[in-house]
Image (cartoon, rainbow, N blue to C red):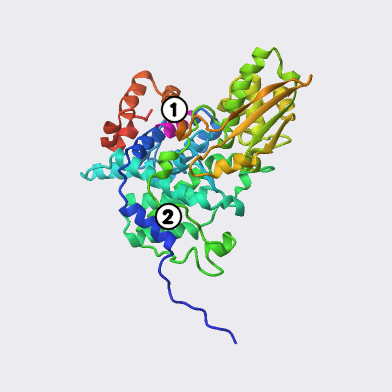
Amino acid sequence: MSAAIENVRPEPDQVLVDIVDYVLNTGIDSALALDTARNCLLDTLGCGLEALSYPACTKLLGPIVPGTIVPNGAKVPGTQFQLDPVQAAFNIGAMIRWLDFNDTWLAAEWGHPSDNLGGILAVADWLSRTAVAAGRAPLVMRDVLVAMVKAHEIQGVVALENAFNRVGLDHVLLVKLASTAVVGQMLGLTRDELINAVSLVFVDGHALRTYRHAPNTGSRKSWAAGDATSRAVRLALIARTGEMGYPSALTAKTWGFYDVLFKGNAFRFQRPYGSYVMENVLFKVAFPAEFHAQTAVEAAMTLHGRLRSSGKRVADIARITIRTHEAALRIIDKKGPLANPADRDHCIQYMVAVPLIFGRLTAADYEDALAADPRIDALRAKIECVEDPQFTKDYHDPDQRSIPNGLTIVFDDGSALDEVVVEYPIGHKRRRAEGIPLLVEKFRTNLARRFPGKQQQAILDVSLDQARLEAMPVHEYVDLYVI
């Protein structure tokens, strides 16, 4: 005799409620967070502009139906596209993630919180143009910066203690979550509607990490975040119609997210939502490299100079040891053939070999033309990674958040160069004074790839002035980027 199924609709899961109450009720008054968000905005848009030089990216951009123009639609920076907010979010999201050069957050889960800008900017621009057309006041860029801080916080705080990668799920799930929450608020959803929207995220389909790992590493990892942030816009718009949600999307026995996809474990939290993540976010300042290798590349650049002054050649190297942390071993320690640029920018051996040989590492260095140089694979074969338990401990320590790597070169004659250790990459909070001027220079370089001098200067005049930027209507700022 079977027991009747309990069918009392529960109160919403606390995780959903906490996210929604944070988004709706918490003001952002941290000057550090807002200033960092401004720098993040510039860097993220600059990464998107650089990606427009790559046909593999641009072939994915534009409207789904060629020739479609959306009145009062969102504009895609660096292009002439004006699209519905869902497709605009995909375009912007794909651009900014394409070259793996935007910001990073490292914890139990990894990710790139500025991926959320795809949905945030698309919706803010669309809402602003629609408001102006109806005679209402537009959103201003402060609204965008605040949404960025909150999206960073949601993605980053959930990531601190919860490893989606351990169950094979891709970190863009957190982009979908954070974007849905902040975009829903921008769209004017009520508290109940926003809880519904966030619940829709967890019952949605979720991307596997398959495309990030051997033997399947591929270019989907460059547009997966665009897909996630655009899906977030779609879910928020669905919830705005009054479509129902699923209050125990996480905790429902058998059918909920925890039981189906998280091995029955509930999420754990280290801290409440505030502005911690934006204040501590990691910028990729110098190298378009997977972040666990940033310090290894910096060490390799130092060793390139020492190699030249020593009178030794790359061909004289017998072996290279990379002393590293566990996450780097799990994600980017690769042997064997590398099939494409997406494979190469997630291989620490490749990212060390190129600067040792050439004294640089740029986005173009992952393309087939340079990868064909036989010296790269020959040197890769001589590089071994070993875990230093202290490095792993420091990586997880919330007071340090280091990403350490140490490189040692031994030559055929038995001599060696002293180990070079870099604990904190130049994009780390501890190196902000050194890093921000270089981040601005990176932005200037990326503007010059796409715009004439007068247009570059108009963008810079606003972008480098916190007060002026915050007060500017969103659509006017985006118009500065139209070609």
Q: CA distance from mark 2 to mark 1?
A: 34 Å
Q: Determine crowd level at label 1: few under 14, some 14-19, many 20+ residues with C-alpha closer than 10 A.
A: many
Residue drawn at the location 50% of the way across and 66% of the way down: 251
The overriding secondary structure of the stretch rendered in magenta is helix
Residue drawn at the location 59% of the way across and 28% of the way down: 297
Asked if the stretch drawn in magenta spans residue 46, the answer is yes
Residue 326 in the image, given as x and y percentages of width and height: 63, 43
- 281 or 289, which lies in front? 281
Badge 1 element = helix
- Residue 475 visible in the current orientation: yes
Q: Which residues are magenta?
A: 42-50
Horizontal side of 206 relative to 329 (left or right) equals: left
Which residue in the protein does label 2 denote? Answer: 235
Residue 345 in the image, given as x and y percentages of width and height: 61, 33
- Which amino acid does the dot numbered 2 rest on? Leu
Which residue in the protein does label 1 denote? Answer: 439
Residue 184 in the image, given as x and y percentages of width and height: 36, 53
- Residue 71 visible in the current orientation: no
Badge 2 element = helix
Residue 114 in the image, given as x and y percentages of width and height: 44, 40
